[in-house]
Each structure stands twice: as C-alpha cells, then as structure tokens.
Image (spheres, coloured by chain):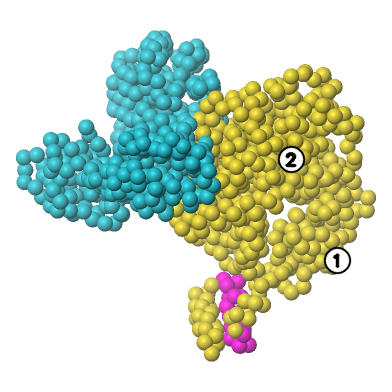
Amino acid sequence: MNCCLRSYDLLWLRCTWAIDAVRNRIPAEMNGISFIALAWLTFGLSFENAVAQTVDPLLNRPSAVMIDRTGERIIVANAEQSKMAAVSRRKFELQGEPIPVAAPVLDMMGFGDTSRALTVSSHPPTLSMIDIDQQTSELFSVALSGRPARLAISVDQKFAAVTMTWDRSVGIVQLGDLGLVNGSQLSRYELEFPPKEIIAIDPAKFLIADAFGGSLAILDAAAGKVLAQHQIQGHHIGGLCYDESSKSVLITHQKLSKIAETSYPDIHWGTLMQNLVSQVPLQSLLEPVGKISSSAKQYQLGNPGKGAADPAGIVSWSDGQFAVAISGGNEVAFGKLGTNDLKFVPVGAKPAKLLKLDENQLLCINELDDTVSVISRNDEPQLIKTIGEPKPATSPAAQGERYFYSGRLSHDGWVSCSSCHVDGFTPDLVSDTFGDGGFGNAKRIPSLFGATATGPWGWNGRKKTLEDQIQATLTSTMHRDAEEQDDIPDDEVVKRLVRFLETLEQPSQVRIQAADNEEDIRLGSMLFHSRDCSKCHDPGSRFTSADVYDVGVTDEFGQKRFNPPSLSNLKVRRTFFHDGRFKSLDEVLRKHPQDEAVFSDVQLQQLKAFLLSL
Amino acid sequence: MSVIEDTRFLSKRLLPMLPYAALQRSCVIALVGLTSAIPAFALGDDPPGVPAKPLQAEFVRAVLETALKHHTEPPTRQQLIVDVLKSIAAKLGHPLPRSLAIQVSDISNTEELYRFLNTQLTECHFYESQECEQLLTDGLQSALTGSVKLIPRKEHLVNEQLAANQYVGVGIQVAQIAEQMKVVSVVEGGPAFEAGLLADDIIESVDGKPTKGESLSTSIERLRGPVGTTITLMARAPGQAAREMTIERRVVPLKTVEIVKQEHIRDDFTVINILQITASTVSDLKKLIDEIPGSVDTIVLDLSRATVSETNSGLHSVHLFADALLDDCELGQLMSRTGTRKLQSEEGNILGGRKLVFFYIPRTNNYVDWLAANLNSQGHFVCFENAMERAVRLWNIGGDAREVKSGQSDFDTSGVGAYETFEVNNDYYITLLSTWLTANTPRRPAVVEFDKLIRKPRPSVKP
C-alpha cells in the first residue's frame, strides 16, 4: 500500500512537471520526457518498474557517436560490447534493437552520406567498415599494426587515419568511393611520439596529437609524409577541433609548471596545473619550422575556487562559442573565443567526446557511467536530456577508476590522478612533490602500468605499501578537501584506487610483422644478463627490483639511492632517470653511470633493440 | 613586537598540514621532511597563555601514528616509541630501564606497544606535566628528520584561508603596545574599515572582555571567528571617548595588485601597482591584465611598494612571479646541497605581447632586487631611484607624451621611459651582487649569477 502511494506521489510530481513543461513551452525534447511521464500515468506503471525497465544494456562504455544518413538516428558505439545503440534524434530515446558489430568499437566515424561508417577495434586490431543502413556487420576490414586509439577520415574522404598509441604510429588507408574495399592496404607512419587524438584538416592532411605529452604532427596522407612537428606548452592533449571562423585549431590540454610545487597555495591559485584551450592558427601548424607558441592564444578553463581538471573533447561554433568536456569535473564548459567567461553544465561520469548535433545542440559521451548527455547551448547552456540510465560503479576497481579520473580528489578540482599519470602512463615530465623529502627536487612522474607489482614506491623507495604511497599523494600532492574526506574517507578511496591500479596492465604492443631485428634482440638480451643489468632490473620483477641503489647520481638534497624504474614501454618514453636528465635511450646507455664496461656501438644497438622490445 | 592579525601567516610557507580528525584535541600535526627547519612549537585548542590541559594516552598515540603514516622517512614504530620516551624521560629527569630498547623491540603487538608507552609515560609523570605538548613535540623532533609542530585546527583553517586569500575576519592588524591593543592598520574596504575603525585606535574590549593586560594572541583569537558572525568592540581614537561598534566577520581578501587610475595616464599605458608578491599575485595580475583593453601596448608595473617576505615562500612566490612575466630564459641559479641548478622560466608570459616597464627602488628587498635584475636582463625597461621622479612626472603631464622631452633627450619616441643608464645599472648590479652575497643566506639558498646577467647585450633603445 505504501509502495503504491509512493508511486502515485511520484507520478503526480511528474505530471505537474509535464504541465509546467507545456505551459512554459519547453523545447520539444523536454516535452518528450513529459510524454513518458504521461504514459506512465496512462498505463499505471509504478516508478520502480519504470526504473527497472530503463536500465539499459544498450550502452556499455560508449566510445563514439554519429548521426545516420536519415538524420533521424544517433548511433552510439560501445567500447565494451559488440553491439551499438541507436537513439532517436527527436526524442533522444534509446531504440530497442541494438546494431550488432564484430567487435567492441573504440572509435567510429560516418563515411560519405553516413550510410556507412568506419570503426576501429582492438581484438584483433582492425579498421572495419560497417553498413549502418542495413544494420549488417563488417563489410571489409584491414588489420592494424597496433591497438587503435582514434580514427579520422580526411576532408576529401580519400583517406582514413588511425592512431596507434603503443605502436607509436599512424596507419593510413586509402579509401575508394565506397570506403574500404577488398584489398585496402595499410601504410604505417612511425612518429616521434605516441599519438592519440587526430583530426582531419585540409583536403588530405591530419593533425595528430601526443597521447601523453605536448607534441603535434601534421601528416600529409596524399604525399605520404609527416610535414611538420610542433610542441605546445603543455601536456595531456584531450581534444582537438578545427575552428572554421578563426582558421585555427583549438587544443585542450594541461600545463604542469616546472617551477611550482604541489603545495596548497600553488594548487589553489592554479599555478601548479593549468587546464587550457590553446587556439593555434592553422597556418602556423602547417609551417614545418617555427614556434607555434608565439601565435597561440590560451584560455583558462578554471579559476581559483573552481578548477577544471582534464579538459577533453572540444567543439566550436561560428559565433566563437566553444564547449569543452571537463572529464575530471563531470561537466561541459562553455566559453567564447576572445573572452574569459565560462559557464558549466553538469553531465555524467568522465565526459570525453563532444559532437555537434546542429547549431544549437551537442552530445557529450560520458565514458564511465554509460550515458550520453544532450546539451543546448545559447546564452544559458543547459542539460536537456541524459540518454541511458547513469550506472553506478559496482566493483571496487570500477569505483577506483572513477576516482582515478576525478578532479574531486584534489583541492578545488584542479587535478585528477590522470592529469599527471595520463591514462595511467606518464607524460615524462617532472613534478616537484613532497614525496621525496621536500620541495625543490622535482622528480619524473612514473608510469603506473604494472605499478602494483613494483614496490617499494616513491623514487627513494620509502613507501613500503602502495596504499601508503597513494595516501601520501592524496594528502601532500593533491590536497584533497576536507569536505570530500567527510563524504568518503581517504582510506576507502585508497583501497579502491589500488584495485583499479591492479587492472592497469602493460599495454600490449601488437605488431603484425615479426620484428626484423630479432637477432639483435637476442644478442641484446644476452648482453643485458651478462653485464648484470638484470641485478637491479630483474626480468622476473617487471625489470625492476625491490631495493634502492646508488648509481652515481644525486638529487638536489643529496639523495643517492633510488628504486630502479621498470623498463617496460621504453619505446614510448622520452625522458629517463629520476629528474628526466636523459632524453633518449642512447644517452642513457652511453652515460648510465653504473656501466663499468663501455659498450661498443654494435653492442649498444643490440642492447637498445632488446630494451625496446620489452 | 607587533603581531599582525590578518597577515602574519600570509608569507609563511604552508607546509603540508596533516589533519587528523580523531585527535582528542582538535589538532593538526605538521611534519616537515628533510628540507626545512622551522621551530617546533605546540598549541592546544585553547588560546596560548592558558595552561595546557594534560594530554591523554589516545592523543599521544594518534600523534605518533600520524607521524608514522605521513613522514617521508618514518622510523619503525618501536624505534619511534623508544626515541620519544627517551627524550621525554630525560627532560623530566626520570630514569628509564636500561633494557628499554630490548623490551620495546620484543613487543610486536601495536596495542601492547602503546600500553607499554603509556605505563612508562605515567611513571615519568608525563601526563601531569604542564608542558606535555612541548615534551611530546620535542620527543618527535628527536625521533624524526626535519621538524615537527602541532598546531590547533583553528590555526590550520586560518592558514588555508590565508593561502587562498579568503581570510575571514574583521580586517585589521593589531599590536599589543603598553598593555593596550592598538590597531596598526585597517584593510581598505573590509568590515572594520566600513565600521569606521582607524589605525592607531585603541580597542578596549572584544565582546565585553577587556583587552588590557591580555596576551595579544588571546585577543586575536577573540577577533577571529566564522564568517557571518559578529563581534562587538569598544574602541577609541587616541584622546577620545570609546565608542561601541558591532562588526560582522567577512571574507577579507587582501589586495596584491591594483590598477592605478589616473586621469592623465595615456591610453596606451596601464600602470599596475604590485602591492605584495604572494602565492596569489600571479593569478591576481593575470586577472587584471585580462581586463586591459587591446589598445594598451605597455604595462607599467610599479614594484616600488611591493612587499615580499624574505622567507622560503616569499622566494618561491617571486620565482613564480618572474616566470609569469618572462619568456623562456634563465632566471639565475638555485643552490642546493649538491651544487647549483638553473632556474629556467617557461615559455610564454602573461603580458599578452605587451611591452613591460617597471618602477623599482633598489635595496628594499633582496627578492625584489633579484626580480628587477631578471626583468632588466631580459630587456624590459627599468626606471629606478632618481629616474623615477622624472618618469612619474611624465605620466602626470598627460596628453601626448611623445612630445614631452622633460628637458631630457633620453626619451625615445615611443614614450616609454627608457634611460641611458645601463652603465649605471652595471655598477649597481655589481654592488647588488656583493650585497647579496654578504646578506644572510636564505633557507632556500639562491645565488643569482648577476655577472652572467650583466654581460647579456641589452637592446638599444636609442632611435
């Protein structure tokens, strides 16, 4: 009886709202919601039942959205299930029938009239074409040389480009009039940095951004070469978009100060970490040489009192307005080029990508709670609807993942764990934290892949448990606010973060061809063992060991004994040693002070080949 | 000695303060690692001056556990307990069993360890001591590298407010002079300012409690309170009758920068006073510069009144300030235990492509001197000492300064006050260098290689 009453109350509330909606002439989309409420009333469904029915398996870690040929359907790809969802364009409601695909989709883009789409998947690494109209799965596919990250189709629709972060390359496939055809070939372009975000510019050029640091490259697919490489002032590039009206590229990224320290004031005043939109004229990016910073303009995405950790996807309109997904703040920020005004709209967990639906509306993919937010812009941007029921994180690891990407772990939301340990890896920058004895001796940010198995922690190896290390980070680096601690105590957060870090395995470097230097690798491995490298970098312990060693380098405090870092993923690393003093593996091998015997050039080559294969 | 209500911590370096909610007295323990040496002191929640209440065993335990959890180089629990116990017993003149270390190392259970500690402390009459907080702090000090201090939670809150420039209070600085509480200064625009309180006024009572003879810190504690609450002061101007005023506590942001609004300043100039260089100055200056119209192509920073505390945090704030103004250049060198390292300014500055001119009076502050040397070495124009008067006059004249020669020939046609004084600069910097080197080495030693800076060619400003 009680239950019935409660349902009735809720329905009554919904009804009032529906009437208000009609009275206030709320946009059609809102009325759509009120119709649902009326439908409940008509059919006498209880609220609880309605909730049970709307829990939707159609969205499972949404990764990309597109509008189909009819303009009536929004297609949402999922990174964790082999089916995509369709959403009605008018009412923003999920449609019952999922679209089957061969594998979970990591990124997707409509091709031609968008009756077809290109998708990328990781097991095995493939670029595929699917027919959206026919709801059939793969038409054709091409094997990739590494796990794909993002996908782009050139403006002239003649090339598809796929970034492969851990392969440090971009794959280019030539497209026919119908897209991928039987026998389409992949050309692999190795870059000087691990790439992630990519957009098409010019007829056949792509702008490619660093997955962790601040490098940018322009790749000309028609000419088959990298035209230019640049460096932005910052790291963690989360989104790119081309702004037609200003003929410039908007880049969302962060900037970690080398001079600031992880003290409360430096975080509070936004001195340590800035969350930014950089506006760079396209022309200066196309120049093969020259600094882009001199022509770039920067817009701050946070103010003292309100940080905006981890800016990701960005879109802009012809009137100069732009929207940025603030993935560490679960918000979308609206700003205007040339001004510093910002407005924020709350969305779901870890908003990552944005898609303009039309002049007035945009979609925001919330990766971690399996929803897509529909937002209207104008002077007062607001959330119109959330597609899908926000899913709570149930397992400790999933809860830990949300914490990892949440700016709320830091004072005023300036940084998340991922701001420095970008997606668990490292931007190879140094940061002056309190963890190694005090401020004034900045240390390189370590990668967290496999970190649960590589104790002790901290450069000086003083933290014997990972829990202690994370607790110290929350307290003395991120300065988690007391109100948040009252909500969920640090201990709980730390436990869940550890569970999440356990899931961060070494990223696989899937390569199709066997390495052409296998003999070098074999000889390098023999050298590695015969020269006792394995004493400190034990292959049985992920190429590290649980002790601290004096290798002849000291930090600013005179500390000499450091815990050796794991040698995994050296291929995508750019700086080495506790302070990032060495900039290449060659330099390390030539100057590693522990090497008593000097290696010959040939031996160096072999050792390097072995290390890069780890 | 004048203690300042509002700003006494503003310049203090805020070290990680580790709140420990479970402490019986609401205290915060601050542990400092290897680098800094700040004097250890201990305070309860009671205002200083009031005899401290005896400590409880749980409190001691909580403090020790906090130290173990958060210190960068924690000893073992047994070692910590032995060291703390030894230090306390020695101070209280109580003999400890010879086999103390062995006894303690035999106990592996945490509960038992603390029971043992408690028994020993009771035997020492530690809990009866009036100075047990100090004893405990000293004990920790003997056991840990770096230094330790216990500060009340309220103090911690004030520190955070000051760091965030969100200080809650009435906005006055007070001093205890001849047993009287005297207003040293009043923050412009603050609640006390609005209530008509003036510098040199004497505060006779706070909320009905007379201030005469009371310790300054006790009175300051009374002035402090949550935002929105009120206090009633009886205050009088020297030689006048006291009047009662009720003042609401508000957030009193302290100004670090301000735009000088003067009628005759040319349109293409904006003069900004730098009042103090603190953690918030860069952020505040950035905000001001964002508001300056695009037609302004020169920013004049008046550093002549800039205050900056000669502490670690002051130096750090000046580094950040220099980094914000300069673009990709060397900011001198920092000295550390293992030699010197270059301090490099990062690419980009907050000027938005504008020219920078700055006013400055040498030798007012080591750090401002350092800043000026860096700005000057990067080709920014400097006006100082005797040149300053002339420059100020230039802006007061108004109209088109291009035509103003002020009897001198050394203004270039852009109207920016640039002087043929670089040779003088060199001499000056050499003097400065020797002053610098003979001055007390700051805690975070910084030796600036002025010599190197001087040799850099400066752009010619002569047409």
- Relative to B427, residue A394 above or below: below
**Residue at left 29%, top 26%?**
B397
- Which residue is labeled 2 in the image? A541
Magenta highlight on residue A31: yes
Is the N terminus of chain A in the top left, top right, bottom left or bottom right quadrant? bottom right
Q: Is residue A234 above or below residue B65?
A: above
Q: Which residue corresponds to the image point at 44% horizontal and 26% vertical from the top-left?
A: B444
Residue type of the residue flagged with mark 1? Thr
Mark 2 secondary-structure assignment = helix
Q: Residue furthest bottom?
A: A1
Residue B2, horizontal then vertical, whole percent: 22, 34
Of residue A106 and residue B300, the one placed in the foreground of this image is A106
Residue B373 included in the magenta stretch of the image? no
According to the picture, the residue beneath numbered tag 1 turns out to be A136
Closer to viewer: mark 1 or mark 2: 2
* Magenta segment: A27-45
Quadrant of residue A382 in the image?
bottom right
B380 to the left or right of A351: left
Q: Say which chain tag 1 marks.
A: A
* Residue A448, quarter of picture: top right
Q: Name the dominant secondary structure of the magenta segment.
A: helix
Give chain B's shade. cyan
| Secondary structure beneath label 1 | strand
- Is residue A237 in view? no
Image spot of residue A311 (x, y percent): 59, 49
Please determine whether, in this image, residue B356 is positioned above or below residue B213.
above
